[in-house]
């Protein structure tokens, strides 16, 4: 697994500044008044810091943005990153400040002078998240990043506050790695192995194999994986950190590669479908975080792992399959496979765990990208309370999420002439009809949210807290949801 850069917290030691190598980062508030460490940097650089902070350019910096002084005289450092961060900065701004520092981070590491900033731990999270680099498939590995030392007024309290945040960063990294791996590496077997490996962290992990899934009647899921040489699996991860209450269930779509099946996708861009296990990746990342920070909650994560491909025994358009619930589905388009996988896993999750709430994540529809682009995930729900909690958590974590409507008229689009339903509802409102399909496998008494992460799981350009590629969108949000709604 890609490990986050090492970050430690220390009492401020002014005399260490001159000798620090690599990057020295200093937080400067909106008044531009230098603290003791700032005054030392200013003295060492013979006034350069004060001139920079007083300049028009620095005055125009947004909270969390940085100016860099290269090769400062009087210091051993390569650069001084001067980060604008008001005392009352938000969590999001503090993380962006960390991201700015991460971008200046090289092999000699960084010394971050955080003074008494109340969000120093969030700055550390920002550094960790932005410093991610996926190099597992490169023979020439990424240049190692040096250690990050954060000097702050109350080092002990900040270190304590940073612990759960750095656990979240590890969860995000786990998700990003899974999403980044190609399908010939992250096979269903390898995926299950990486999840089973988390037993070390105190999670209970079970792998249901094809024979088990057949016994359970998960024919919709099995039909998707039928043509693949990779065995289909469902992996169940339990974190029991709470009391004897029923768990919250997280369900993820884990299509390790989606060719579209017989309804084959066009060649251009098909390589991206290695990320079609993104929902399962997020569920795995959240479970990892909960275990690492020993969350006081009961949460169960379930992922359906399959490959959707072509062969003589592939399911074909027009086939009818019987789901575990018992409903029959006419498969109009074999490329609408995610909902087939989820239908059985959602039903199994409720049947076995009677969860207090259920949230599924899936790279479910291309239509989601058309509707909301790459910044905002689509949320669908049968329960205003759970949905409100989820949207609040997403807002607090700075992850875009927006609720879309559901309703009978959309469900009507799924009527089939020969079976209980068909698996596609036509082009209009494609993301909503997909959600309606899932809703047919959610019991009325189960509060449920579906999050379509097709647009946000993978990005072709950098964003503040993640370099281009897999984002890990959702790990922070769901971790916060558990923290705020299901602990203590
Ligand atoms: N995995 C895709 C959705 C997707 C597309 C995710 C682009 C990420 C980026 C999904 O299985 C799919 O193929 N959906 C179809 C549904 C259609 C056949 C109703 C789609 O969106 O075209
Ligand atoms: Mn598909
Ligand atoms: Zn898919």
Image (spheres, helix red, strand yellow):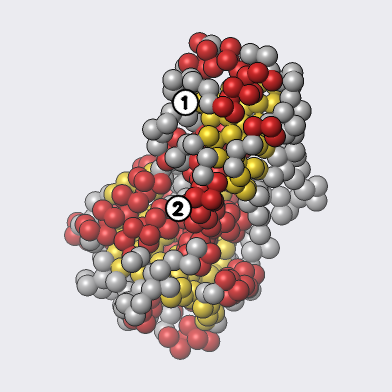
Identify the residue under disc 2. Answer: 476
Identify the disc placed on residue 29.
1
Q: Residue at x 73, y 53 (%)?
A: 137
Residue found farthest to the right = 140
Within 8 Å: ligand 1 and the Cβ of disc 1? Answer: no
Determine the image quadrant of residue 337.
Answer: bottom left
Please state if 370 lies on the left or on the right of 467 as rendered.
left
**Quarter containing the C terminus:** bottom left
Q: Nearer the viewer, mark 1 or mark 2?
A: 1
Query: Mark number for residue 450?
Result: none
Q: Position of residue 221 (x, y in %)?
A: 46, 74
Q: Quadrant of residue 449?
A: bottom left
On the image, which quarter does residue 383 sit in? bottom left
Q: Give me the C-alpha separation between circle 1 and circle 2.
A: 27 Å
Judged left or right of residue 37, residue 254 is left
Determine the secondary structure under disc 2. helix
Q: What secondary structure is found at the residue carrying circle 1?
A: loop
Q: Nearer the viewer, residue 217 or 157?
A: 157
- Whether residue 453 is visible to the viewer of this picture, yes or no, is yes
- Percent position (x, y) of residue 486? 33, 65
User: Where is 151 relative to 391, above or below?
Assistant: above
Question: Callout 1: 10 Å neighbours few (<14), some, many (20+)?
Answer: some
Tell me, yes or no, whether the two marked residues, 1 and 2, touch with CB atoms within 8 Å: no
Above-or-below relation of 57 to 106: above
Judged from this view, the residue extending furthest toward the left is 408
Q: Count the marks: how many?
A: 2
Q: Is mark 2 within 8 Å of ligand 1?
A: no
Q: Residue at x 58, y 12 (%)?
A: 51
Looking at the rendered image, the quarter that the N terminus falls into is bottom right
Please name whichever residue, 352 or 269, is drawn nearer the observer in this view of the structure: 352
295 over 78 or under it: above or below: below
Which residue does the image show at 32% across and 46% down from the upper left? Answer: 402
């Amino acid at each position: 697994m890609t490990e986050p850069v090492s970050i430690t917290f220390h009492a401020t030691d002014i005399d260490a500044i001159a000798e620090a190598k690599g990057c020295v980062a200093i937080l400067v508030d909106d008044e531009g008044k230098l603290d003791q460490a700032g005054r030392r940097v200013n003295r060492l650089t013979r006034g350069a810091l004060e001139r920079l902070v007083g300049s028009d350019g620095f005055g125009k910096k947004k909270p969390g943005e940085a100016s860099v002084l290269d090769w400062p005289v009087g210091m051993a450092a390569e650069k001084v990153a001067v980060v604008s961060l008001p005392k009352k900065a938000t969590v999001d701004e503090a993380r962006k400040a960390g991201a700015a520092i991460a971008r200046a981070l090289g092999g000699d590491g960084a010394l971050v002078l955080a003074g008494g900033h109340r969000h120093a731990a969030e700055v550390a999270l920002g550094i960790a998240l932005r410093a991610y680099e996926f190099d597992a498939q490169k023979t020439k590995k990424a240049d190692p990043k040096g250690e990050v030392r954060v000097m702050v007024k109350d080092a002990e309290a900040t270190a304590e506050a940073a612990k759960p945040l750095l656990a979240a960063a590890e969860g995000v990294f786990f998700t990003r790695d899974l999403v980044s791996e190609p399908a010939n590496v992250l096979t269903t077997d390898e995926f299950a192995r990486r999840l089973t490996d988390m037993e070390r962290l105190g999670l209970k992990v079970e792998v249901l194999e094809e024979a088990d899934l057949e016994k359970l009647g998960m024919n919709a899921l099995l039909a998707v994986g039928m043509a693949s040489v990779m065995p289909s699996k469902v992996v169940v991860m339990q974190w029991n950190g709470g009391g004897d209450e029923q768990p919250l269930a997280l369900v993820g779509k884990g299509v390790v590669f989606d060719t579209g099946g017989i309804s084959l996708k066009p060649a251009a861009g098909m390589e991206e479908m290695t990320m079609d296990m993104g929902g399962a990746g997020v569920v795995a990342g959240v479970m990892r975080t909960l275990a690492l920070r020993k969350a006081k909650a009961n949460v169960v994560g379930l992922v359906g792992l399959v490959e959707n491909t072509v062969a003589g025994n592939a399911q074909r358009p027009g086939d009818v399959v019987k789901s575990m619930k018992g409903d029959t589905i006419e498969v109009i388009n074999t490329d609408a496979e995610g909902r087939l996988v989820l239908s059985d896993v959602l039903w199994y999750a409720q049947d076995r765990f009677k969860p207090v709430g259920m949230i599924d994540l899936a790279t479910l529809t291309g239509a989601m990208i058309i509707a909301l682009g790459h910044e905002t995930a689509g949320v669908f729900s049968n329960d205003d309370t759970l949905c409100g909690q989820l949207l609040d958590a997403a807002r607090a974590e700075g992850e875009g999420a927006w609720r879309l409507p559901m309703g009978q008229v959309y469900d009507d689009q799924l009527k089939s002439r020969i079976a209980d339903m068909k698996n596609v509802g036509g082009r209009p409102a494609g993301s909503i009809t997909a959600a309606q399909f899932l809703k047919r496998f959610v019991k009325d008494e189960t509060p449920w949210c579906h999050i379509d992460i097709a647009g946000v799981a993978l990005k072709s350009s950098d964003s503040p807290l993640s370099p281009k590629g897999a984002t890990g969108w959702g790990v922070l949000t769901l971790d916060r949801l558990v923290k705020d709604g299901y602990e203590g």
